[in-house]
Image (cartoon, rainbow, N blue to C red):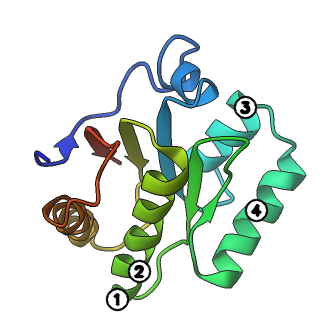
Amino acid sequence: MRSIIIENYPDTIFSETGDIKNLKNKNLHIVCPAIKKNSFALNYLAEHLQMKLIDVIRLIDMVNEKKEPGCLYPLYTFTLMPEHQEQENLDFYFEEIMKAQEQYFKTETMLFAFDKGSWSDMQLVKNTLQNKINEWANANRINHLKSCYFFQ
C-alpha cells in the first residue's frame, strides 16, 4: 500500500455526486472523530444522511464514553472514533477500524476526516495511521482497501 494521500479539503466531500454518493452506495468507508459541535460527523450523519440529530448525539456520546470506535455497519460505511484521548489509544483505535474495514465494510477507499483541533498532534495521528496500514499490508491482512485519504 502506498502512503496515505494527504489532501486539502476536497470540494466534492459534501456533494451528492461526490463522497456522499459513495457513502450512500457503501463504496466509501468514512472515519471521523466523535465530536458533537459543528463537526464532520454531524455534517455527514445528520445533514447528508438524514439521521435524526438526537440519534447522532447518542452515538457520539456512546463512542466517547466507551472510548472505542463505533461502526454504523450495516446501515452506513461510517465509523466514529473517540475524541482526543491518550496517544497510546490511537493504535488500538486504528486496529479496530481496520478490522471493521476488512471484515465488514470491505470498501476500496477510506477517508479519515479529522476536524481541526480534534487531536493535539495531528502528525502523530497521521503517522500512527500510516504505521497501522503498513502493518496490515505487510501481514497480508488487507484484501479490499486500495486507497486511504486523510485530511483535516
Assess whether mark 4 and mark 2 are in contact (beta carbons under 8 angstroms).
no
Which residue is disc 4 drawn over? 59
Mark nearer the viewer, 2 or 1:
2
Q: Which residue is mark 1?
A: 88
Which label's residue is closer to the chain start, 2 or 4? 4
Left/right of residue 5 with respect to residue 83 in the rendered view: left
- Residue 109: image x %, image y %? 36, 36
Please name which of the two marks, 2 or 3, marks the residue nearer to the observer. Answer: 2
What amino acid does circle 3 point to?
Answer: Leu
Whether residue 57 is visible here, answered yes or no, is yes
Query: CB atoms at circles 2 and 1 under 8 Å apart?
Result: yes
Q: Position of residue 51 (x, y in %)?
A: 81, 39
Q: Secondary structure at mark 3?
A: loop
Residue at 13% x, 63% y is 138
Q: Height in image: 120 above or below 22?
A: below
- Residue at point 26%, 38% (across, down): 146
Whole-angstrom CA distance, mark 2 to mark 3, is: 28 Å
Calculate the distance from the C-alpha at mark 2 to the C-alpha at mark 4.
19 Å
Amino acid carrying mark 4 in the image: Leu
Question: What residue appears at the point 69 percent right and 28 percent down from the top-left corner?
Answer: 48
Disc sitting over residue 49 in the figure:
3
Tell me which amino acid carries mark 2. Answer: Phe
Marks 3 and 1 sit apart, C-alpha to C-alpha, by: 32 Å
Q: Which of the 4 image quarters holds residue 20?
A: top right
> Is label 4 in a helix, a strand or a loop?
helix
Q: Which residue, given by chain and number where applicable, does mark 2 sit on?
A: 92
